[in-house]
Image (spheres, rainbow, N blue to C red):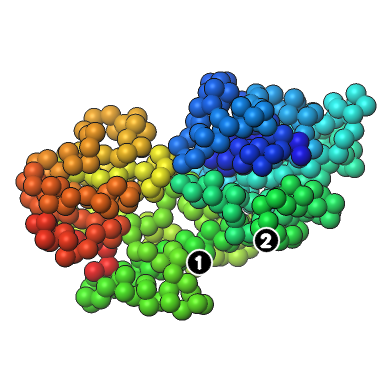
Amino acid sequence: MKVAVIGTGYVGLVTGVVLADLGNDVICVDNNVEKVAKLRAGIPPIYEPGIEEILKRTLSDGFLTISDSIAFAVEASEVIFIAVGTPSADDGTPDLTAVRGVATAIGKSIADLARRGTDLHKVIVNKSTVPVGSGELVEQIVLNQGVDPSLFDVVSNPEFLREGSAIRDTMQPDRILIGAKRREAAVKLVDLYATLERPILITDLNSAELIKYASNSFLAMKISFINAISRICEECGANVSDVAKGMGADARIGSQFLQAGLGWGGSCFPKDVTGLIKTAEQFGYDFSLIKEVVAINDDQTLHFMRRLEAKIGGFKGRRIGLMGLAFKPNTDDIRDAKSLIMIEQILAGGGVICAFDPIASEHVKVLYPDIEYTHSVYDVSKDADAIVLVTEWNEFRQLDLKRLAEPMKTKILFDGRRAYTRANAERAGFEYFTIGG
């Protein structure tokens, strides 16, 4: 099938290279000239395990083309994915500026093709995470360009990929969701995804758009719930891992997203949870439950830092080592990363920071150039008053804790991800603190 993907961020690029790897003729489009040049050279602009290999392979095989022209992509394609960013505006509502701009350009291209006598039907797919009603918005924008309604359909096809495992999630999704007004448009997407042999759910447009927000908000709620339970565990002496294991053994609850930690972050959960709250307000419902989920999450890292500050007698003049800066392992993404909250807290208190991350240090360095960044995780503990595990990279789980502890001024370890056991940490000489026990 001939496919265009407009936008080459996490969602767009992963979608494009995977569809090309499945044998479709794919054109990935971006308006950033520098990014286009790198992609043509086989250099992905994001860190994602496996993506460079697939990018180079599909370019070499001729199934993937990189372009900066929406008009070129629209003319050559049957299915056109919109996969541009929808960041939160200042008031928390999704900013659809990029979606509107792309929809306008697509509409103008279809209208131009019709004037030239080319009237191949196009299926326009909202892949970006968008609020309820966005499908209708895109449809109206295209109609406003003078396009006959018989020449296109708008379909919602939300993504459910996770950074760090985006390729696998795209190749082996739990479900493929398609929201459409007309059966024929939905069938086009069914045919496109048929080779994946995964469950497909077909709904109306509004339901598909709401499912994405509802799904991520429910997962965020599970994380906030177990983090709230962790606070009780800290006071009563219970172990939150045992509590989570006991809860997760119930098939009605399940064990996923019941790992107590510093809270959720990244590019999806904060934006999508806020988007659901704003969508509810738009339709006259005060979603107080989800607002409390956000409040619990916002306080989780701050509570952890208050414990650290109290233990070392304040941050002033103290040297703190941070292990990990990305919001999660296997990504260089620092959007809403808990490390940034910690850095602000420590610096505001007059502390000194030494940090290491396998991938994300360069991004944090742009924001905090005066922090000391090391080339080895073991170097963060040198002369430190305390060290903090922020991101649970696999290589951090395998550390020689005794070696990590040896050069410290005071051997205090705050484990924000429950990656270590108390017995192992104390055997290495650490005074060990973690979340929920």
- Tell me which amino acid carries mark 1: Ser
Residue 199 spot, x, y in % from top left: 67, 61
Residue 155 to residue 296: above or below: above
Crowding near the residue tagged with mark 1, few <14, some 14–19, many ≥20 C-alpha atoms within 10 Å = few
Question: Does residue 81 appear in this view?
Answer: yes
Residue 367 to residue 300: above or below: above
**Residue at horizontal 54%, vertical 40%?**
10
Q: Is residue 192 left or right of residue 66?
A: right
**Residue at horizontal 31%, vertical 74%?**
242
Callout 1: SS = helix
What is the quadrant of residue 182 in the picture?
bottom right
Q: How many marks?
A: 2
Residue 43 spot, x, y in % from top left: 50, 27
- Relative to the observer, which residue lies in front, 189 or 230? 189
Q: Is residue 259 left or right of residue 221?
A: left
- Relative to the observer, which residue lies in front, 312 or 258? 258
**Residue at horizontal 79%, vertical 37%?**
78
- Tell me which amino acid carries mark 2: Pro
Residue 37 spot, x, y in % from top left: 56, 20
**Residue at horizontal 70%, vertical 50%?**
195
Callout 2: SS = loop
Location of the C terminus (image quadrant): bottom left
Question: What is the C-alpha distance between the residues marked 1 and 2?
Answer: 33 Å
Residue annotated with mark 2: 199
Location of the N terminus (image quadrant): top right
Tell which residue pokes out farthest to the left in this image: 409
Crowding near the residue tagged with mark 2, few <14, some 14–19, many ≥20 C-alpha atoms within 10 Å = few
Question: Does residue 177 appear in this view?
Answer: no
**Of the image marks 1 and 2, the number of the one nearer the N terminus:** 2
Residue annotated with mark 1: 288
